[in-house]
Amino acid sequence: MKPAPPFHSQKKAVANPEKVSVSLYYETLCPYCRNFILDPLAKAIKTDLMTILDLQVPWGNAMILPDSTVSCQHRDECYLNSIHACVIDIWPDVIMHFNLIQCIEEQSSAMGLGNGAEALYNVCAEQLGFPAKPIKDCHESARGRELLLQYGSRTDVSIRLTDMSSGVVNGNPLLESMSASHTEANLCPQHVFHIPPAQFLRKGHSTQFALQKIGVDKAKGIIFETIFEKLDIKQIFSSSPTIFRTADLGCAAGPNTFLAVENIVELVKLKCQFHGLDLDSLEFQVFFNDLVSNDFNKLFKNLPGDKEYYASGVPGSFHGRLFPPASLHFAYSSYALANLLKVPDELQDTVSPAWNKGKVYFTNSPKEVAEAYTMQFAKDLESFLKARALELVPGGLMAFLLTSVPPDTKCALTAVLDLLGSILMDLVNMGKVSEEKVDSFNLPLYFPNPIEFKDLIAKNGSFTIERMHALELPCPEVGEGVMHIRAILEEPIKEHFGAQIMESLFNQLQNKIAENSVAFDLSYKRAFVLCAVLKRKMYLENV
Ligand SMILES: C[S@@+](CC[C@H](N)C(=O)[O-])C[C@H]1O[C@@H](n2cnc3c(N)ncnc32)[C@H](O)[C@@H]1O
């Protein structure tokens, strides 16, 4: 029988300029490599490093013989090298393929090869919810051999090893072998890469987008799991024509939105292939939503030329209805829900206990100010959820990324927003800004804590929470952090105070942070990104 065509991810394996290329030259079934993969590498991958690494060259000391066959040291090693190569090819994202590779190594250590090498990846694929068939198809087709030979030639030309596992960072071999004892330190960027924080960030895009992209990348694995387990794809295929409709709510003008929707399209296709559904009959429609003030022209100009979906712009606030009933299969929103629909009125009411005099946020303000912010966020989220409950199909999914602050702790982000208020008051004292201007300004932002967010979803009642993770973002160096905050706050501040104060305001913010305990006091907690995936209930009770 003709083997099934190899399964390929749509993602092109291009070198990613903002990533640190760490090539781990290893082979399967080698105890040193396994120890390295299961201990220091697994630990490193669980940190933020995962988002900047490109990994893995499964070849080791294998050799290409004169008759073009590949020879390996251990029985089944060539077979498993090819399986690893296929896994990396099918799921190019580190977060995706590393879990499977780690599991295969664990299984081979625990079970040995008594049940045959194929049993190892079948067990892992089942455990992790990955489809095993595409791996088998890739291995049995010319693709598996092609990948293996590519890795072989990379290993030959890049580094000839004395150890079974060794590493190359951005093209430079690590001189010492990768032993479990010291590689944990090596894989810590501060210790070995000596990369200034700016280099963690995507070149050519603003810092704001680069920091946000880290969350988008991390969320991919979580969204993948949920699509895989919870999306009723057969139901979608039961209608003709088969159109999968997805929306990015608060998309801005790119580039993160393109990456996010490309991820969703890719993951849905994976799911279809797993179920043997005919991809040719499936079409994707993507709605890019943002406020009418968004630069939709820029968004449309930047749409990727090779996109695999029909694109439409949907202007308007996501706090109201944007789509016909039961028309969306997947809604996505990243870093947009923190924007409040409006600043609560009582913050500017001079006779209210919530009057936020001399402050722009609620850190260190009377408790009534914080309560007013909390209530506004609750109202906003409820209107958002109500609209989406009607627009999503029953069983439809909705993924969020939102900045979140830990409850009842000193948080660096909110402390910095407080410093911004105190700098504005300094400008008042210098006569550069009027006091009334500061008193009448409050930042229209709110960062819920995870428990609060969970409670609001439960109160709404139309969704179940399928996944919820708090992902800690890397702490940017002061200058980068200020650029990030400026990118988010520039517009509302400029609109209220005028463009002339912007430079000195943000320069002073940078100086003030550097002198303030927030820059070095380790008891300040970092904000994190909350990644949640919700499922629209099959029946709505409160509508
Ligand atoms: C910080 S940007 C995030 C952009 C993009 N999602 C990302 O992850 O890079 C927040 C976006 O949400 C949009 N936004 C804020 N409030 C909105 C609302 N009520 N309805 C639709 N979009 C909104 C803003 O205009 C802005 O483009």
Image (cartoon, helix red, strand yellow):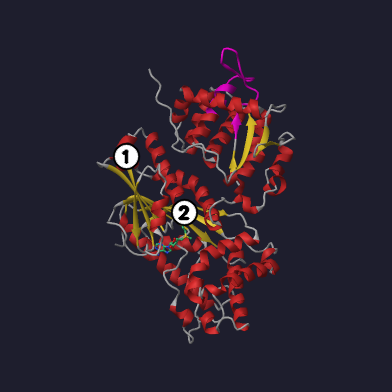
Residue 89 seen anywhere in this rendered image of the structure: yes
Q: Please tell me whether mark 2 sits on a helix, a strand or a loop.
A: strand
Quadrant of residue 94 within the rendered picture: top right
| Residue at the outermost left position | 240
Residue at the disc numbered 1: 282
Mark sitting on residue 532: 2
Is 317 one of the magenta-colored residues? no
Residue occupying the far top of the picture: 67
In this rendering, position of residue 510 left or right of residue 540: right
Q: Quadrant of the N terminus?
A: top left
- Residue drawn at x 52%, y 55% is 209
Q: Ligand 1: does it lie within 8 Å of the C-beta at label 2?
A: no
Question: In the image, residue 517 lies at what x, y percent?
Answer: 69, 68
Q: Position of residue 221 (x, y in %)?
A: 49, 45
Instruction: Indicate whether 326 appears above or below 179.
Output: below
152 shown above or below 446: above
Residue type for callout 2: Ala
The number of numbered badges drawn on the structure is 2
- Circle 1 sits in a helix, a strand or a loop, which is it? strand
Q: Please tell me whether residue 36 is drawn above or below residue 411 in the rendered image.
A: above
Name the N-terminal-most of marks 1 and 2: 1
Magenta residues span 56-83
Decide which of 348, 395 is in the foreground and name it.
348
State if disc 2 and disc 1 touch (CB < 8 Å): no
Residue 495 picture location, percent across and down: 47, 73
Residue 444 lies left or right of residue 508; in this view the side is left
Q: Residue at x 56, y 15 (%)?
A: 68
* Residue 63 marker: none
